Image: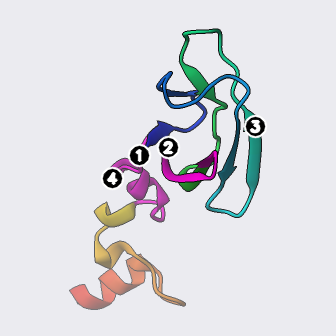
Amino acid sequence: MTAEVDRGISLPMAAVKTGVRYRIEMESGTVIDGRFTSPKGATALLSPISEPGYHTLVINEQHMTLAVAPARCYTIGDAWRELEPGGAATPMWGRSRAGVRPAARRRRRCG
């Protein structure tokens, strides 16, 4: 079963009845205990989960994997922002080495 972080998780009406207890065993080791509540004939809802990962949902001793995805995936843009200022766009000769300034290295190479 899949879900998104911080969103309620709906289950088919036939899957559970109001008042049935459930347990979510988080990937981190945390355990969430709860009880289904829903109006008669409505979809049963699990509380939103704020931790992405692969968790185990236990209902009536039945175990199922619950994959909770972040609201947004890690992108190339995120990777670029994590690089040092200038990132990969900075020419290699423009990066400084310990004790040598970039301008001094250019003068030395150019004559």
Residue 31 sits inside the magenta stretch:
no
Q: Which residue is mark 3?
A: 34
Where is mark 4, residue-wise?
76
Q: Identity of the amino acid at label 3?
A: Gly
Residue visible at 48% across and 59% down in the picture: 82
- Could you tell me the amino acid type at mark 1? Cys
Q: Position of residue 35 (x, y in %)?
A: 74, 32
Q: Earlier in the sequence, mark 4 or mark 2?
A: 2
Crowd tier of the residue under label 4, counting other residues whose Cα lies within 10 Å: few below 14, some 14–19, many 20 or above: few
* Residue pointed to by mark 1: 73
Instruction: Quickly name the residue at label 2.
Output: 70
Q: Quadrant of residue 30?
A: bottom right
Residue 61 drawn above or below residue 18: below
Along the viewing direction, whichever of 73 and 8 lies nearer the viewer: 8
Q: CA distance from mark 2 to mark 3?
A: 22 Å
Which tag, 2 or 3, sits closer to the chain's start?
Answer: 3
* Spatial separation of the CA atoms under disc 4 and disc 2: 16 Å
Question: Is residue 16 depicted above or below 106 in this figure?
Answer: above
Q: Please state the extent of the stretch shown in magenta in the rendering.
A: 58-86
Could you tell me which secondary element the residue under label 4 belongs to? helix
Neighbourhood count class around disc 2 (C-alpha, 10 Å): few under 14, some 14–19, many 20 upward: some
**Mark 1 Cα within 10 Å, few/some/many (few <14, many 20+)?**
few
Q: Can you tell which of label 4 and label 2 is closer to the viewer?
A: 2
Amino acid tagged 2:
Pro
- 51 with respect to 106 (left or right): right
Q: Observer-nearest residue: 83 or 85?
A: 83
CA–CA distance in space, label 3 to label 1: 28 Å
Q: Residue at x 32, y 83 (%)?
A: 107
Q: Residues within 10 Å of mark 3 (few under 14, many from 20)?
A: some
Can you say whether 44 is above or below 31 in the image? above
